[in-house]
Image: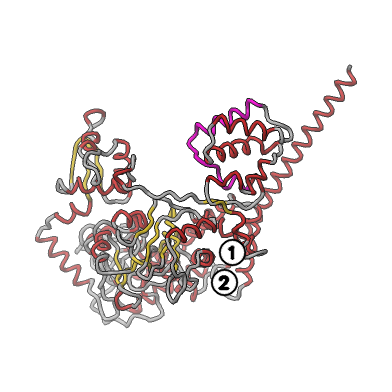
Amino acid sequence: MRNLAQQIYGNQLTEYSKKQTQKQKNGYSSRLGWVFVSKDFTKETTKAVRTYGSLFNVSKDYTYFTPNTFYRNDLRRLSTLRWINAMSIDIDAKNGENEGMTLPDVQELITEAGLPMPSLIVQTPSKGFHVHWFLEQSKRASDKLNAHYSRIQTYIAEMLKGDVNAIGPERLFRLPTDENTVFHSQARVSFDKLCEWFQLVQEQDQQDVHTYKKGFCKGYESLLKHPAVLKILEGVNKGQRDTACYTLALAYKAAGYDEKTAEAYLHNWNQKNMPQMRQIEVKRKVKSAYNGRFHAPSAKKIRELSGMLFSYVIWEEAKPREERTYSHIEEWEGDVLAFIRSRGGKVSGSQRDLAEQITSSADRDKKIPYTTFKKVIARLEEKEIILKSVSSKGRGASTELTIVNEIKAVRTQSEKSNKTQEDSNKINGFNSNTIKDTVEGGTALPFSTGSSLALLKDTLTPNLLPTYSPIAQSAPIPGNVPSAFVSALFNRGFKDGRFIFRAWGKVQLAFKEFGITYRDIAATAGYVRLAVDAVAVTVDKKGSMIAGDFQSEDGFFKYLFGATKGLFANYRADQILEFVVEIESLSDIMLFHVGLELEDELKASSVVDRELIVTKLAEIEREQSARQRRKHYHNHSAFDLNSSLNHFKLFMKTDD
């Protein structure tokens, strides 16, 4: 369960929960997310966890989980999603629906749909199936992404005879166990690939709802009989010959032909090309295909060369770990951590010596390869699970590895620090307006979603007395301010409703300069997170009530206004940059399609960020213009070259 969870969530969960004092000192990371587990689909039995330890413990008593994670631990809603990690489908087998369906039937449906191999298939007690595709890289949730996710999910559910009502990235699915997992592979898919699949199938289905089946190949043995491959075998034009020869050689290789036979067939195929390739080039392409690392042709290349729909999935069951020649790096992570824990949470020595001492939990005779050990250490260090320090250089170098949270947990505090912590907790007490912390792995009122903000000083500074009196009678907290923003201020000792209301007003004014209305700020999760981060930045510069270094109201509000503007400007710049990178890789048709979608958004009665859409449309126009210029330049360059060659030939004839 732990290895599978790490495969899904990566660094969105931590190994162990932090103490409250550690959170106040180091802040909260925006990469983390909450996983919801449930005994059934009722709210009363739902629990949120944020550590692998908590998830492992509750998995014995809970039945369902969310593959995607949330930034709030009290509300499992589409609007509170933080990370999308998987595309998941529910195939029901109730009330006579899909009666008698087996795992091979599900695999057949996936193959016919042209979908990639899934990462996990779980069978439910009712003999239904939950199918999951883990994403290569988690996607940050947004309103637009969530909507597109649901569109793709609906299409996949229709093709797999799944439940088209169980749609949405926020849904619960059955927790995988050794007993109910019927298929598990290390396969992952990019969200862009799923978008391409959706676009391709959508275009075909506009003509015939069953057209998609015509383009899919069931296995390597039928590759050479598929209409798209047969089309390429009829011969290609000059600009396609090299790619076609290499692609066909891989097709023969995948179909089981030896190199000599494949070369003979391709020499015959070459005679159909206009003009033909040189025989030595055919030989080189075949040799490259058979000696290279690819075992089968690219479906994308076959589509491009044939101009026809083509896709295929080859099912390869994952072998047990003890039978693999190379254990998955995530499984080695568990072995490395177990080794360090067995030595008190800290080890030191040369890296080669440390690697020599680590064995596989599945096979005690198998040691971790040195190169794999270095990769594992780098991954664990990046996830902030371990701390690595190196002393000296060269052969005398010594590496110290420490499991961060476990070392922090065993540190003893002095009486003075214990008293400071008690005083801090008293100042930061919860009132009746605060969400009660009943969850595993953290607090219900996070300080910030920022990952690198130093929120509080290491120690309290009693010499700096607050100018904002905590003794004065507090006004009630306004109900129209988002709870996350209220919590960000409340947890720092700002409990007066008037102060919180004025702070929210400064945030609203900052957003207004970018054309964002007051109503849309509170309704958009990303904007609220940005406002919470602005509070963290402001506290770092202007102090807080809880730390005792608060300076003044006016200075705080002015800095909050500027911090919000600066963070949103960076946020907007990142959005545009990501969009430009995305559209540069799209085909002309896809680029046109994205432009139409944006224009439809702009025509809607309620637009959250009109300026962003207008900017994106301008970027699309620039990209389309740039492509036209490149085509124009290419065509004229080719024309000028041909013209020069003709003039040269005419000159030579005249000279003769």
Alpha carbon of mark 1 to alpha carbon of mark 2: how far? 9 Å
Residue 488: in sight, yes or no?
no
Residue position for label 1: 613
Q: Considering the numbered disc 2 on the image, is that residue within a helix, a strand or a loop?
A: loop
| Extent of the magenta region | 279-303
Task: Find out whether residue 282 is within the magenta segment.
Answer: yes
In the rendered image, residue 316, in percent from the top left (x then y), is placed at 43, 48
Image quarter for residue 653? top right
Residue type beneath disc 1: Ile
Q: Residues within 10 Å of mark 1 (few under 14, many from 20)?
A: some
Q: Nearer the viewer, residue 580 or 76?
A: 76
Q: What secondary structure is the magenta-colored segment mainly?
A: helix
Task: Find out whether residue 290 is within the magenta segment.
Answer: yes
Residue at point 15% right, 68% down?
422
Report the quarter where the N terminus lies: bottom left
Residue position for label 2: 607
Residue at the farthest top position: 656
Give the side of residue 88 with respect to residue 541, left or right.
right
> Across the whole image, how many numbered discs are drawn on residues?
2
Please name the colour scheme applied to the rendered image. Answer: secondary structure
Q: Considering the numbered disc 1 on the image, is that residue within a helix, a strand or a loop?
A: helix
**Tag 2 or tag 1, which sits nearer the N-term?**
2
In the rendered image, residue 207, in percent from the top left (x then y), is placed at 67, 64
Image quarter for residue 549? bottom left
In the rendered image, residue 606, in percent from the top left (x then y), is placed at 57, 75
